[in-house]
Image (tube, helix red, strand yellow):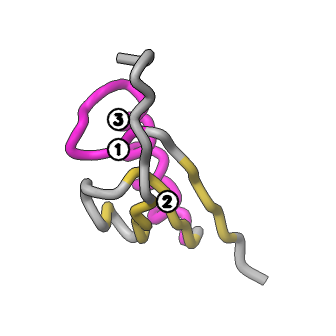
């Protein structure tokens, strides 16, 4: 039985911030450990990073949140 990990984020590439940098480090680690992973992120960004498949989801902007 192999380990599989699903990650969900509200921000991803092309945005670069602490969350995205941490996710990229985590995905690189998961790949090196042989752990299958998938990332759910707002659509419009990168579609793959390391061995992690990135699934774009429809996002809605909140007018009161910058």
Q: Quadrant of the N terminus?
A: bottom right
User: How many other residues sit within 10 Å of disc 1, few (<14), some (14-19) or many (≥20)?
Assistant: many
> How far apart are the alpha carbons under marks 1 and 2?
10 Å
User: How many other residues sit within 10 Å of disc 3, few (<14), some (14-19) or many (≥20)?
Assistant: some
Q: Secondary structure at mark 2?
A: strand
Asked if the residue at tag 2 contacts the one at tag 1, i.e. Cβ–Cβ closer than 8 Å, the answer is: yes
Question: Residue 14, located in which quarter of the rendered image?
Answer: top left
> How far apart are the alpha carbons under marks 1 and 3?
9 Å
> In the image, which residues are magenta?
11-34
- The dot on residue 12 is 1
Question: Residue 18, located in which quarter of the rendered image?
Answer: top left
Give the labeled residue for mark 2.
39
> 20 or 9, which is in the foreground?
9
Examine the structure image and report whether residue 4 is included in the region drawn in magenta.
Answer: no
Q: Residue 16, relative to residue 63: is it above or below?
A: below
Give the labeled residue for mark 3.
21
Residue 21 lies, in percent from the top left, at 35, 35
In the displayed orientation, state which residue is furthest to the left: 14
> How far apart are the alpha carbons under marks 3 and 2?
14 Å
Q: Name the front one of labels 3 and 2.
A: 2
């Amino acid at each position: 039985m192999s380990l599989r990990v699903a990650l969900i984020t509200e921000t991803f590439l092309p945005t670069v911030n602490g969350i995205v940098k941490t996710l990229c480090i985590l995905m690189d680690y998961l790949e090196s450990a042989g752990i299958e992973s998938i990332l759910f992120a707002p659509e419009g960004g990168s579609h793959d990073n390391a061995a992690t498949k990135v699934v774009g989801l429809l996002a809605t902007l909140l007018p009161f949140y910058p």
